[in-house]
Image (tube, rainbow, N blue to C red):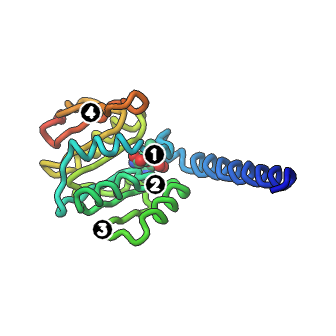
Amino acid sequence: MKVVEWIFAVLILMGVLFAVKLLYMFATVSVQPITQGAMFVPTANIRVSTFLDAVPMSADDLLVDIGCGDGRVLRAARKRYGVRAMGFEVNPMAYLIARVRSLGIEGIQIRWRNFWKVDLGDANVVFCYLFPDVMERLAKKLEAELRPGTRVVSCNFPLPGWKPLEILSPDSSLHDDPIYVYRFPDSCRL
Ligand SMILES: C[S@@+](CC[C@H](N)C(=O)[O-])C[C@H]1O[C@@H](n2cnc3c(N)ncnc32)[C@H](O)[C@@H]1O
């Protein structure tokens, strides 16, 4: 390849990266009033495996990821346990990536919906990686809707007033933020 062609290729690559960044910013800002700070930041794979190791599921269970991002938690859980997996996502970019990456995989449903408007009563496991500002409101929603025995897993941010059964910390210096594991209603303040 000639030098001019290399320069051209690098410029195109930079343009594409810039466009993706712009799209990410636009998608994030457009849903900020709903997400209240919980941006599209996928959970590291080592953290997903740590969660799956600690929270076994059966094929009859329904796992719900409230704010499923690119859907990686749903796919990993489906692959490991054959669980039914459902994700809600409002960020259009994350939703599209989740749909495309989950194409052809049975047992996974991804909906473009605000999870605050969905009843979570059918879930056996609720997974979330949200933001501190919404955790109090989320605790109240879960207390109102969950069935006894439902497990709740929250990455990074605890549910105020709830007592975790376990706090997981992946064996990785880069990704060692806590993962809180709860069981309803034993863990909560009812
Ligand atoms: C930190 S990311 C986590 C993504 C995914 N759960 C994971 O662990 O890889 C949080 C996601 O929640 C989504 N989200 C936040 N509030 C939401 C809401 N009310 N309804 C649906 N999705 C929401 C955001 O758009 C974002 O993609």
Quarter occupied by residue 128: top left
In the image, is 134 to the left or to the right of 12?
left
Give 24 or 120, whichever is nearer the viewer: 24
- Dot 4 corresponds to which residue? 168
- Dot 3 corresponds to which residue? 107
Residue at figure coordinates x 23%, y 38% from the top left: 181
Residue 186 at x, y = what percent?
12, 38
Q: Disc 4 or 1, which lies upstream in sequence?
A: 1
Q: Disc 3 or 2, which lies upstream in sequence?
A: 2
Q: CA distance from mark 4 to mark 1?
A: 18 Å
In the image, is 53 to the left or to the right of 173?
left
Q: Amino acid at mark 4?
A: Leu
Residue at figure coordinates x 35%, y 38% from the top left: 155
Q: CA distance from mark 2 to mark 4?
A: 22 Å
Residue at figure coordinates x 47%, y 41% from the top left: 38
Mark 2 lies within 8 Å of ligand 1 (Cβ measured): yes
| Numbered disc 3: secondary structure | loop
Q: Amino acid at mark 1?
A: Pro
Q: CA distance from mark 3 to mark 1?
A: 21 Å
Check contact, mark 2 vs mark 1: CB within 8 A. yes
Residue at figure coordinates x 32%, y 70% from the top left: 106
Check contact, mark 3 vs mark 1: CB within 8 A. no
Q: Which mark is residue 70?
A: 2
Quarter occupied by residue 71: bottom left
Q: Amino acid at mark 3?
A: Gly
Check contact, mark 2 vs mark 4: CB within 8 A. no
Residue 141 at x, y = what percent?
29, 45
Q: Residues within 10 Å of mark 4 (few under 14, many from 20)?
A: many
Q: Amino acid at mark 2?
A: Asp
- Dot 1 corresponds to which residue? 42
Residue 60 at x, y = what percent?
17, 63
